[in-house]
Amino acid sequence: MTILIVALFASIVVLCHGGTVETSHPASDKIIGKYIELSMNLTILLADTAIDEAKIHQLSKDMVSNDYDEDKVQRVLDKFMESLPADQKKDFGRLYFDKVKLDYITSKVHRVLGFYLTRHQIQRLRDVLDKKFVEGASRSQLVEAMVEELTKDVKREKAVKAIEQTMKDLKIFNRKNPGWVDKVEALFSHVLVHDEM
């Protein structure tokens, strides 16, 4: 009887384990693929620098694990940049960080402006600002000129609110990221010129 029970358990174990097929999860495969791709790209890009390869792989892992949130990725990059010695900071900034940071800041500024205004409204406002600035207008006159330009499309109250909210968001953004708005402004002007060609 004991032999029969042992044989039954053995056949159940063989039956249960023999038929299992290892499957993978598509989401985890995608994450692993992103990690491998980012890690390889960063390793190749930073091969000629003194940055430790293990740090590069850890950075890739941290970036991919926070891939769903741009702000967290930027914090990971900032933390990594701060942990590097001065010569490695310079290399990392020149080869990777400055471009990624500029892309991030550019997209944030475009989202702020795009939330309130269309591309054509933004271009018209830039033209009005340039014209009024050359004339030597004060800050309040510049704001009023922008409001007047927007009232061609929307009601005055909505135009005032859009201008005020955009200015407030850009001030907050500039405080958090000093100097980046100027870089984005130069890039934005360049993109608008080429976009209309």
Image: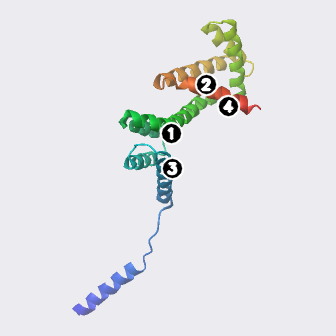
For the residue marked with disc 4, what is the amino acid? Val
> Sequence order check: which comes first, mark 4 or mark 2?
2
Quadrant where the N terminus is found in the figure: bottom left
Q: Nearer the viewer, mark 2 or mark 3?
A: 3
Q: Position of residue 49 (x, y in %)?
A: 44, 43
Closer to the camera in the image, 46 or 30: 46
Q: Amino acid at mark 3?
A: Asn
Name the residue beneath numbered marker 4. 191
Q: Which residue type does callout 2 highlight?
A: Glu
- Determine whether label 1 and label 3 are within 8 Å by CB: no
Q: Quadrant of residue 132?
A: top right
Determine the residue positioned at 37% across, 50% down.
Answer: 54
Alpha carbon of mark 1 to alpha carbon of mark 3: how far? Answer: 12 Å
Any part of residue 161 in sight: yes
In the image, which disc is placed on residue 185? 2
Gap between marks 4 and 2, in whole Å?
10 Å
Q: Earlier in the sequence, mark 4 or mark 1?
A: 1
Q: Nearer the viewer, mark 1 or mark 2?
A: 1
- Disc 1 element: helix
> Compared with residue 12, is residue 42 higher up or lower down, i.e. above or below?
above
Residue 156 appears in which quarter of the rendering?
top right
Q: Is residue 155 left or right of residue 108?
A: right
> Could you tell me which residue is drawn at 71 percent across and 15 percent down?
128
Identify which residue, 6 or 166, lies in the foreground: 166
Question: Who is closer to the viewer here, 89 or 79?
Answer: 89
Residue beneath the point at 69% across and 9% down? 134
